[in-house]
Image (spheres, helix red, strand yellow):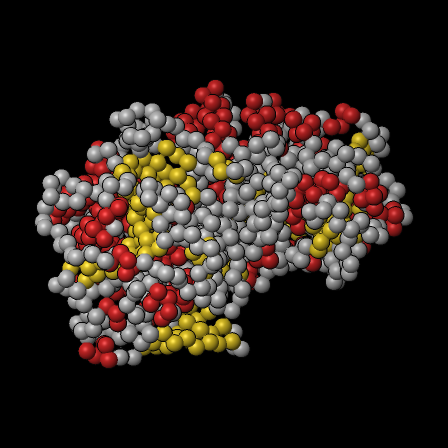
Amino acid sequence: ISKCGDWIIVHGSFPSKNDENNASPRAENPTPAGDSKKRTFATAKVLTHPTHSINIKLTYGFVVDLLVLVSCYGGDGYDPLENALKIQRSRRLVPKHVSNEDHLPEHSTLPVYIGPQDGLKDVDKISILPGQPAGTDFDQYSGYVTVDPNHGRALFYYLAESPVNSSTNPLVLWLNGGPGCSSFGSGAMMELGPFRVNADNTTLSQNKYAWNNVANVLFLESPAGVGFSYSNTSSDYITDDVQTAKDSYTFLINWLERFPEYKTRDFYITGESYAGHYIPQLAHLILQNNKITNQTVINLKGIALGNAYVDDETANTGMFDYFWTHAIISDEIHEGIISHCNFSEGATLTDACIDYIKQGLAAKSNIFFYDIYTPLCSPFSGSTPSISRFDPCTENYILGYLNSPAVQQSLHAKPVQWESCNYFINTNWKDMPFTVLPVIQDLMASGISVWIFSGDTDGRLSVTSSRYAINKLHTSVKIPWYPWMYQVISYKIIIFLFSPNFPISSNQITLQLSVHFTLLVFVSCYGIDGYKPLESALKIQRSRRWELNQASNVHLAEYSTSPVYMGPQEGLKDADKISSLPGEPAGTDFDQYSGYVTVDPNHERALFYYLAESPVNSSTKPLVLWLTGGPGCSSFGTGAMMELGPFRVTADNKTLSRNLYAWNNVANVLFLESPAGVGFSYSNTSSDYVTGDAQTAKDSYTFLINWLERFPEYKTRDFYIVGESYAGHFVTQLAELILQNNKITNQTVIKLKGIALGNAYLDSETDNTGQFDYLWTHAIISDEIHQGIVSNCDFTEGGTITDACNDYINQTRAAMSNIFEYDIYAPLCSSPFRNSTPSISGFDPCTEVYIRAYLNIPAVQQSLHAKPVEYIACNDFIYTNWTDMPFTVLPLVQDLMANGISVWIFSGDTDGSVPVTTSRYDINKLQTTVKTPWYPWMYQGEVGGYAVGYENLTIWTFRPKLPTRARSSVLHFLLGGKASSQSLAKSTRIAQRW
């Protein structure tokens, strides 16, 4: 039985004739002698909810496990690399530590079997694949190459030639890892081949970004037993690195006889995961055998390793460091691994270490190891697009397609039950060298170009592991870290060394780590020419640290007892009611209000608000005040219209659509434009626009007291304050002021119950250290920049920011280029002449463009009862002239907690400005006790994020890959919910920022 979120997969198996005979060829995937497990035939039932079930008949029991992998990737499903490494850990030291140095020289001089190849190329040519799209303009071949005639062992290949210049383009060999996984199914059909299998399992579509557009690409199923490759000798399925390298080399020598036109072509080997072993070992063997005078010389030019397993120590330390920096494991688990696990060669893994490793893997839950932000495939629901718009059910489609008899016949494959990975091979792998880094060093010294490329979101063989592996090579940087660009979207590349063909020096070697781009869309054209209000304000703070901090020592207590202006409110509620907004969709079923509340009649200073009442039970639901940060940014434009309000502005800039996941579905939500000068708020005294934290808190409190007179029905309602970014200051300061003023007997008592802070700026030290640590662990800045900041920057209160520190900070900003700081995987808004790019949540990155146009329509401003102004999202003058900015508001947070006010800190995983790392550092600085240990919270069977409970404090993280409707927690808190995985699953939907 396997459990996959809400899905339960029940496996059953019984013997078949092949098991009983125990001597069949690979075509039936025999169970080796002495193995009592019956794998050859199975039935599975998938159950979910009492009303749904489906029976699936499978001809090989492992495929049932594969179904778990596909439907519930990293949960209880089969994970080939982790499974192999788990076996390695249990045998530590590594399986007798059979090393490359021991073996590759041993067989490099042995005779290589060369079989007859005449006429086989023509036989292997594919006329057409079933369901192939019309207009296919390249040749493709597939078939078998015998590598051991005595054992009847043959490897399957698929060649996709280039549609243009195939006679001159290089030859690229692709290898998938595992060990034991298919290069054809996973490599060609899922990743970089010319076709994709459609959801009907029977037709193909063109992959516009296929590698064969620029090279002739050869996919090899290796070792025997993987994919369509086979042996007639069952003992061949107990194999290892050495035999795999030898068979792959024998394959190449024979294949080049079959395709002699490729003998003089430039040759490259690429692959991923455990192929980090296969590729260097095969390349090393090629180099050695190229020295034999009577042997075919393979024109090897370079290798490329993608998220590759090249060193056991760096793979393990990198993985757990990555898990911690990406908010998957707790501080306690990470510290336990650091303290108890010695992953170096020859070290023994203690019971305590193994226990923490198990805790780390359990915390991961069902997150897909190899792409931590990808959604899962569900057998009953429609597939959910991932960050890269890749269909997570693709492996299901491939499994169905490649098991079609007509497809296997067109591929010239033996009739088999095709599977993505071979469980038996994987679990019986014999030798697994601790490291292949010495082999890579030897290749570099021999003039072979080496590229290491890493996707940002692979958690098993992370970019962190790749960087650690490169550091272990002890080689020098020749070209410093820089961003590489694709169209208008910024991604990252790190060059550590150069290649012989790189236009710098003929004797330099290349080693590159390129970071694969994965997309998660958020807001508009911030980045290159856009401004970043929080970063600008903090830059000013760094240059005026002492002055701003001293100004902030004007304590809230100083003015909490001063008289609060109370203006006449009678009749203003009715005047503020919005009859209808221009372009509002039909069927709007809630009341909305907007207008001004005067907070200083002498200066004629007034704050603008927008209230969206709940469509159901508005008379009993709580009141939530939303504040956007900056400082100086609009709560109405950004908060209501972009994030959590009831409407979205459509691309025509004129009409609105309903936000199905608006917060007013479960609460009455009040958006306040504060301070004066932000959004539609104003003052007739220009000096009021030079303001700061203290005045903002005082004005916000004055607003609330007057607004409650205008809306007296809310005086007894539970009240919550929520905000993001610099509103970490606004929210806490206003809450503290409310607590103080509630003690005044003749003052309106505001029924404050709690506050929630989203990716909030609370403490200057933690914000700076957290941000730069986050940018380093997310492959945005280099080791050198990060180390320079650590060594030269003192971010503590009273610390001096030196010129050297500022220089490294400037280098960081340059490295970030035009990445959107508030969501590092968001593509930018397209130019005005192109369509915007959709995101995983369906959120349009050009939304702010639409909002600005809409809110500047005179009819819209009139319907909002707003003064005619040029609406802008953030006021540059206000944030560049901010007068007081306390170094920290954590003491206020502690005071609120001590007074029984619930505090929730929630952080989106991909905010690089005030990242989840900063939030965790904030919590640590509060020095409070854990009540509910770190755990994953679930939404529809998937991990939505993680939570930790403290006394009157909870931190929640949000993963970006879930659909918008799953961003649930804050309103659950507002309704008085406790931190538990059961209640979280029932939480109400909230806005897409988190």
Left or right of 28? Residue 53 is right
Left or right of 20? Residue 731 is right
Residue 22 lies in what quarter of the image? bottom left
Q: Who is closer to the viewer here, 592 or 974?
A: 592
Residue 936 visible in the current orientation: no
Q: In this rendering, is residue 477 above or below 857?
A: above
* Quadrant of image for the N terminus: bottom left
x and y, in percent, of residue 691 in the image: 70, 28
> Residue at the location (75% across, 60% down)?
615
Q: Who is closer to the viewer here, 408 or 749?
A: 408
Q: Who is closer to the viewer here, 131 or 674?
A: 131
x and y, in percent, of residue 431 in the image: 19, 54
Q: Who is closer to the viewer here, 476 or 993?
A: 476
> Residue at the location (46% across, 76% down)?
54
x and y, in percent, of residue 984 in the image: 55, 60
> Residue at the location (80% across, 50% down)?
581
> Residue at the location (57% across, 40% down)?
828
